[in-house]
Every structure is written in C-alpha cells, then in structure tokens.
Image: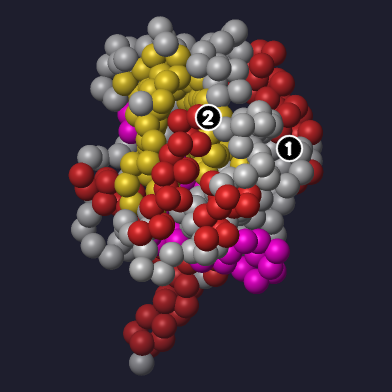
Amino acid sequence: MLLFFILITSSFASSKELPSQRLAIDDGGILAVDSVDLAIVGNTRAANAMLDKKRAIGGTGAKDVLGDITAQNMVSSLDFLVHLGDMVPSSSLANWKEFGSVFSGLVDGTTAPPSALRRIPMLPVVGDRDCVKSPHCKEFSKVFPGFGQEIGYGRVATWQGFDLSAANGKKWRVVVIDSNKEALGSRWREQSTWLQKAVREPGQGLLVFVHESPIARRKGQATEAIQELMDLIGTNAPLLSLKGVFSAGVANNQLYLPEGALGPIHVVAGGGGAPGHDLHLGVKGDGSEPALDLGFSRAIEQLVSGYESLEKPPSEKSFHQALGTETFDGFPRVVSAGDFPPHGWWKLTIHDEGLRLIWRAKGASGSFADQGVWTWSREAGWKAK
C-alpha cells in the first residue's frame, strides 16, 4: 500500500513538471562542423478560439509540418531546429506539456519519443505567446534550460549569440533577439547593449533570428521595437555583413531581397501550422512595397495553380483573386489561407561555398515538396535557382 502511494505521488509530481528540450548550443559557444543544416519554422501553436477569431483559418497543420521535418531528418540529418516563436497559445503547464508531446518525435528532450528515430536539439526564439503569462519568461527558461544568460535579480535573458564554423574554419555569427520591448522592461536596455557588441565581428556574415518580422506584408506596420533593433544591427555590424533575417511574426511564408542580391534576405517562416494569415500580394506589376522576391512570387503562383487539379478545387474567384486574373486583373491579389493553407518550413545549409535556402511547403496533393531554392555566394550574393 505504501509503495502504491509513493508511485501515485511520484506520478502526480512529475505531471506538474515542465518538459525540457536540449539546446543546440550555449550562448557564446562555437559549433564547428563540415556543414550545418538547420530546419527553420515558426507559429506551430495550437488553434485558439480567442486568438484566431479574426484570422483566415486554413486549419492547423503543425503535425504535418513536423512530420515532414522528421522525414527529411531521416533522409539527410539535420543539425538542429530553429523555432521562431509562438510555440504555445500561452505559457501554461498544459500548453508546454502539449508542446513537448507534439515535438517529442523530432526534438531531443525529457518527453519520451514515440519511436527510436534520431532526434535533434533546438534553438528557441521567444514569440508573442511563449511568455504571455510569465513576463520574466521563467517557464520558458525551464523548458529550454541554459538558453540566454542569467542577468541577475531572477531575470532571464531572451537573447543569445554564437558562432557556426564550416569546414574552411571561417565563422558565421548568429544572434537571437527579442523584439517584445514592453515585456522585456528593464531587460530591453541590456539586450540593446549586448546586441551592439554581438554583431561587430560577424566573420563570413551575420544571421538574425527574431519572432517579429521587420519586413512583411501584413496588417499594420512593424513595431518601433523591431526597427530599433534592426537599426542597432545596421549601425554596429560591418557594411554588407548582414546576410539573412528569419522571422515568423505573420502566419504564412514570405521572402524579400529589399536591397538586392548583395543585401540580406528576409524570410518570413510563419507557416508552421497555426491557423494561417491570408497573403496580400498587392496589384500585379504595381511595384508596391515591400516587393516580394520574384522567385518567391513564381513559387507562390505555381503552388496556387496546383490546386486546380483537385477533384474539388477552390472556387474560381479564389484562384483569380490569388493570381490577379480575369475580374481581379488590376485589383489587389490575396492568397486565401483557407483555400491555400500556408503550411511549410525552411531549410538553411551553411557550407564552404556559402548558403543554401530551401522552402518546403504542403501542396494541393497534401504532400510536401521543395517549392523554391535560393543560394548565396560572396561573388553573386543571393540568387533564386
């Protein structure tokens, strides 16, 4: 009887514990490998009636997206997963336990995996929802033990920097930043001071991971906070050293080269499975800003056109509105998240010759495929393949 009581008590206690995930690398560390393959995704949180009541809902697809990342990890091993935030609807115990369960087949952690497949560590980025009931991110720091730095007075840094070193020995600097200025409070100034130093010696180039998108097609403008952080990077990093900014503040996928091939690529990787946002493309050919990369625009059009072969395709109106054809010629194009779910993820490879970026997304058939490929080299900059 006593043994039974101990077992029940132990089980009840463990049910109250937050799951924890293995970090890819410590703050200030160096990861040296021949090449580095990263899976990048954001907005995998579950649907929520309050959060999504005004959102164009194309269903939830996080399990499908994670399933494809897991499958790709079996084919060609990934080094780690970068999650760009909005992992949970709120920072409650129940939400984090569900997160641990959903990710248990891919991410190495305390939640038992459903199979013996190889699991990978994770690099977390704080999203809008991930510390919503915990301003100091104490639960977040327990789910990802060792993330950031202890900065005193019971406060946790939600920013991090480290170096990736490819086979040629040349490093790439990676910084993870938090644009939620109001939630950071006194920590905002500390992050700003840290960031100015962190970007000064980027080696081959600088890669930035942040939840809020500094450049994106969405309702409203980017906040002053993310613009302030980007200005700090622009002021303190060497000229032309910024190579990529990866964010997930919008629940769809977008890609920009606002400064041309030699400038940084801006990727919105927010199609991780949460109910999606419609993608507003503007009037075809009007040059409205921000202007999507032409290679990405072609990939979107091809993805939308694939739905025409379905037995029950979306309405003609949806196709014409997305492609700017027929009665929608000359009117703003909108890719409906309900008719064309924006679920997908991105793979970034860092190797001797430069960078390779692949967008994988779910097509009309329900299977995932490479929808677009971009490469970066020192000679040519960014180029769509």
Residue ID at (49%, 57%): 340
Label 2 element class: loop
Whole-percent x and y of residue 285? Answer: 61, 32
* Quarter where residue 56 is shown: bottom right
- Residue at point 66%, 28% (across, down): 287
Q: Which residue is mark 1?
A: 222
Residue 195, compared with residue 46, is above or below; it is: above
Tell me: residue 185, above or below residue 138: above
Badge 1 marks a residue whose secondary structure is loop
Residue at image position (73%, 29%) is 227
Q: How many marks?
A: 2
Q: Quadrant of residue 172?
A: top left
Residue on which disc 2 sits: 293
* Residue 261 on image: x %, y %: 50, 16
In the picture, measured across the screen, residue 11 lies left or right of residue 288, that is: left
Cβ–Cβ under 8 Å for marks 2 and 1: no
Task: Tell me which secondary structure the magenta stretch mostly adopts.
Answer: loop
Q: Is residue 274 left or right of residue 280?
A: left
Q: Is residue 138 above or below residue 167?
A: below
- Residue 111 percent location from the top left of the image: 37, 62
- Residue 296 visible at all: yes
Q: Nearer the viewer, residue 65 or 163?
A: 65
Q: Residues within 10 Å of mark 2 (few under 14, many from 20)?
A: some
Question: Does the rendering let one see residue 103?
Answer: no
- The verdict on residue 366 being magenta is no
Q: In the image, is 13 to the left or to the right of 137? A: left
Q: Which residues are magenta?
A: 36-65
Residue in view at x 45 percent, y 70 percent? 14
Going by the image, does 83 lie left or right of 368? Answer: right
